[in-house]
Image (tube, coloured by chain):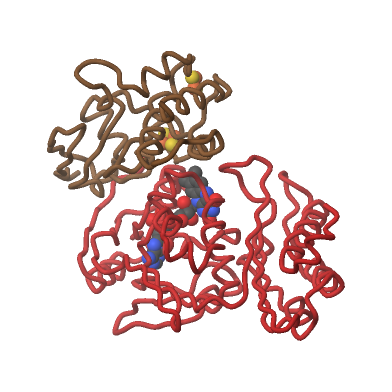
Chain colours: A brown, B red
Amino acid sequence: MPLFDIHLTVNNIPTKVAVRPQATLLDVLRDALGLMGTHEGCRVGECGSCTVLLDGKAVNACLVLAPDADGRTITTVEGLEQDGTLNALQQSFVKHGALQCGYCTSGMLMTATAFLGEQNNAVAEMQVREALAGNLCRCTGYTKIVKAILAAGNE
Amino acid sequence: MIDPLQYFAPTTLQQASSLLVQWGPRARMLSGGTALLPALERAQWSATAIVNLKTIPGLRELEFDPSDGLHVGALVTLAELQRSPIVRAHYPVLQETIAYVATPQVRNLATLGGNLCVATPTADLAIILLALDARVTVHRVGGKDTLSLDRFYPTWGGTQLAQGEILTGISIPPPRGSARYQRFMVRQAVDVPLVNFAIALEQQEGQISHARIVLGGSGPRPLRMIRAERALLGQLAGRETFARAIDLVIADAYPPDDLRASRAYRHELLRVLLRRTFSTFTTTDRANASF
Ligand SMILES: Cc1cc2nc3c(=O)[nH]c(=O)nc-3n(C[C@H](O)[C@H](O)[C@H](O)COP(=O)(O)OP(=O)(O)OC[C@H]3O[C@@H](n4cnc5c(N)ncnc54)[C@H](O)[C@@H]3O)c2cc1C
Ligand code: FES
Ligand code: FES
């Protein structure tokens, strides 16, 4: 079956990947590029664990067809650290105990990154909760995740 | 796992149309992909060819003219509409509606054209846009055609689109009066609505001069409640008038009776939510509202 060459910029690195046309961006990140930080939960857009930034916007990587991502810029959770240390949002997650099993964490971080990037003013709890409507967590009950994001946003 | 696909990235509507005609029912269009990819993944839809519409330029305009209304290209995403200052200023109800749809991530991908063409009987945008008398523009072999959204949806469900036809834009006339959208879910996000509806009303000197009531999930397509709309016209906006209209909606509505809720429960829910929503159209009623 014919492979399809696509060009992506992933975490600031220009990359050329040969993809199966039926692959999703999630398959490309995990299987072709080995970026296992982007998690696969439902594959149908409901859990948010595969959230990445596509041209700066949070999207479900499982809902993007690989050839359709040609030419786009992608940020995954691996792209958040700065010079080998966790960024402020990641450190806030650690400090607030905002993860248990960690399955949802990379998706939560990416959604929160996009959300905080759009805010000019102080963030309110309700806004954070609405921003997380597409990210499921089966462990924490969300409270500490919301606290971690609020703290990072209002620093 | 999605079956092997041929992928096409046409750059004109003509190319896309010919591909769709050539591949027939084995081809599927790709806009946001938020309905298509899950349907392929769950094997609810099958496809051997994907025709990407996003590589066609000119389908993303968002323009408002006071005498003409709003023109939205089929590929405008729900997030773009939700954030648009034009939409906020002239059609706030559209933003209220979009806030109910899916998740922030899905809204960044999902397009208005896709939402209307998937044509589920509970599609939020279809319901509100029917209440706003929207029209759609369709690319056909040998030209384009503009028709009302009401005609775009046949009574038996689905859309009027034939093989090779593409929805290119949506036009919404200048706002008349005001409109509300209401959707009830058990869970506050990413849940299936138990009932959803839109109401648009215009009043002149206290008398109702224009009325639309559109109900989702009560048949193969969103339905206009014509008897209730007629009962409102020329009447004074107020409790008694609204109560008569609500009785007619309940009489004409046939919501599903399924594992999520019984029909009787949905009827009751509908009655309460309609009463609540109608009451927001008159200041006196709002003050007297008993819920
Ligand atoms: C988690 C989740 C929650 C959702 N919640 C909601 C919800 O609350 N309310 C709701 O209404 N929907 C919901 N959806 C369904 C869906 O995402 C939306 O209806 C969305 O707007 C579809 O648009 P799209 O651009 O992604 O369509 P696509 O998936 O790209 O297209 C689907 C199909 O529509 C047709 N189509 C698309 N564009 C055109 C066009 N321009 N011309 C002709 N045909 C076309 C084609 O047949 C195409 O294969 C949800 C989906 C997910 C994954
Ligand atoms: S794996 Fe993409 S949303 Fe669940
Ligand atoms: S920490 Fe386990 S799913 Fe969120």
From the top left corner, tell me how far across and down residue B157 is, in percent: 57, 68
Task: Find residue A56 and report its image quarter.
Answer: top left
Nearer to me, B261 or B161? B261
From the top left corner, tell me how far across and down residue A17 is, in percent: 15, 37
Nearer to me, A37 or A53? A53
| B13 shown above or below B255 | below
| B139 shown above or below B274 | below
Is residue B115 left or right of B54 when viewed as pictured?
right
From the top left corner, tell me how far across and down residue B200 is, in percent: 64, 72
Is residue B238 left or right of B23 when viewed as pictured?
right
Pick the quarter of the image with the N terminus of chain B: top left
Is residue A147 left or right of A71 when viewed as pictured?
right
Nearer to me, A92 or B182? A92
The residue drawn where x is 25% and y is 35% is A28
The residue drawn where x is 78% and y is 76% is B237
From the top left corner, tell me how far across and down residue A93 is, in percent: 42, 19
| B19 shown above or below B46 | below
The residue drawn where x is 53% and y is 51% is B99
Count of numbered tags:
0
The residue drawn where x is 73% and y is 61% is B277
Task: Find residue B70 and report its image quarter.
Answer: bottom left
Is residue A124 left or right of B281 when viewed as pictured?
left
Task: Find residue A11 and report its image quarter.
Answer: top left
